[in-house]
Amino acid sequence: MQHHDYEIETIPRARATLVDALAVGARRHMVHGFVEVDVTRARQIIRRHEHDTGEALSFTAFVIAAAARAIAAHKHLNAYRDWRNRLVVFDDVDVATLVEGEAGAVAVPHVIRAANRKSFREIHDEIRAVQARPASSPQRSGFGMRLSGRLPHFLRRLFLRALRRFPLWLRRVAGTTVVTAVGMFGGGGAGWAVGIVPLHTLGLTLGGIVERSAVESGQVVTREVLADPLAEGFFNAELRHAAGVAVDDDFFTAVFDGSDTPSFTSFGSTTGDAVADIERLVLSVDMAASSKCFFVAAVDVAKRAATLARADVAQIFPLMTPTGGNMVGLPCLVSDALQSGQLALVNASAFAAAVENINVKTTDQADIEMVAAPAMDATTGQGPTSPMSVSMFQTNCVGVLGEIFYGFEQLAENAVALVTDISWTSAEESA
């Protein structure tokens, strides 16, 4: 239905079923394993076949064939617990996968039966047949799929939960394992995805294919690696954290370096001392009605603040957690840049600042000195003075350099205050 500035579309019944399956899967406890696999040889064979015949073989079919054989060799990966608390171990590996069929339509959840006993070619032909005629898949045209779209969502979810207790039904409806290649369609390199496994005990989510340098027979070669779907997310998180700590450290070093910054030692360890420390911080920082102020705590101080309590009050700072929160109505951040026992109050409105995105560079030709304070300096030609110098080339490693450009200027006095040597405790105070 088209309106003058928006339109309303009907959600396909198949997509509603998928939403319910994901809702059921989101409540499961799952363990994720992250691996990278060298697929150079397989990709070379697929490209050579396409060059010779003009036919593009399905890489997903290759992964399904390989995964099914690996699972069949370790049958307890292909097992399910039934409602009588028995373990049902299947001989054949039935692989469920999403097949892109009609343009703009919901992908077809097709099950490849006994994939461990089928060749790469047979699996490829089966996938291409479903792509050409989606209705040929029993999972698309079967009675269960047609009925599912007409049921209310709570009945669909009840049925999906029941399937997990009846392994024979589950195998008939959804196979015994699942392979999804959603991460491979990011375009222009690695694509990343987090897999949710609503029904199965084992699922494989494929990431993107990236090129990596490696040393073979004394020569540097390029290998194609099927990337782990979450490794880049973890890497980015660690990189952002490291950059944040470096920026925080530079900021606090600069603002605390001057003698004008209010800084004092904690009054003591009692709950009353904690309140007095907070009061002194607040009174030491100049504020206006529109000021944006926040606390910054060292990790140990955040833990102490989150658990600080006395007999007549459950918590002194009830909105505080060990990873941040709120104290006396102001946000509190936690930073690894602050030393143990330190708590700062910052009036952000009294600073002008700008920061750019993190720029990442990689190299496999550098030497890296694995020490906290490296002596190497490219501007002076100073080489490593520590035996902990590692060659990226010789060890077949890649060095990563993260650069971030930022700047700030303090616009007013008394914009920051610091309290040190905090040792707050909830131990019962003597009368």
Image (cartoon, rainbow, N blue to C red):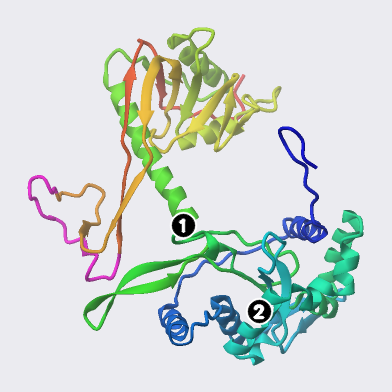
Residue 264 sits above or below residue 26 on the image? above
Left/right of residue 10 with respect to residue 320 in the rendered view? right
Which quarter of the picture shows residue 41? Answer: bottom left
Left/right of residue 98 with respect to residue 35 in the rendered view? right
Q: Residue furthest left?
A: 381
Seen at 60% across and 91% down, the residue is 119
Tell me the amino acid under the disc marked 2. Ile
Of helix, strand and loop, which one carries label 1? helix
Tell me the amino acid under the disc marked 1. Glu
Please check the rendered image and state whether residue 395 is part of the magenta-colored stretch, yes or no: yes
Seen at 46% across and 61% down, the residue is 190
Residue 294 horizontal/vertical position (percent): 50, 22
Residue 338 horizontal/vertical position (percent): 39, 33
Residue behind mark 2: 127
Residue 115 horizontal/vertical position (percent): 66, 86
Spatial distance from mark 2 to mark 1, Cα to Cα? 29 Å
Task: Give the magenta range.
Answer: 377-397
Residue behind mark 1: 232
In the image shown, does 341 or 394 lie closer to the viewer? 394
Tag 2 and tag 1, C-beta contact below 8 Å: no
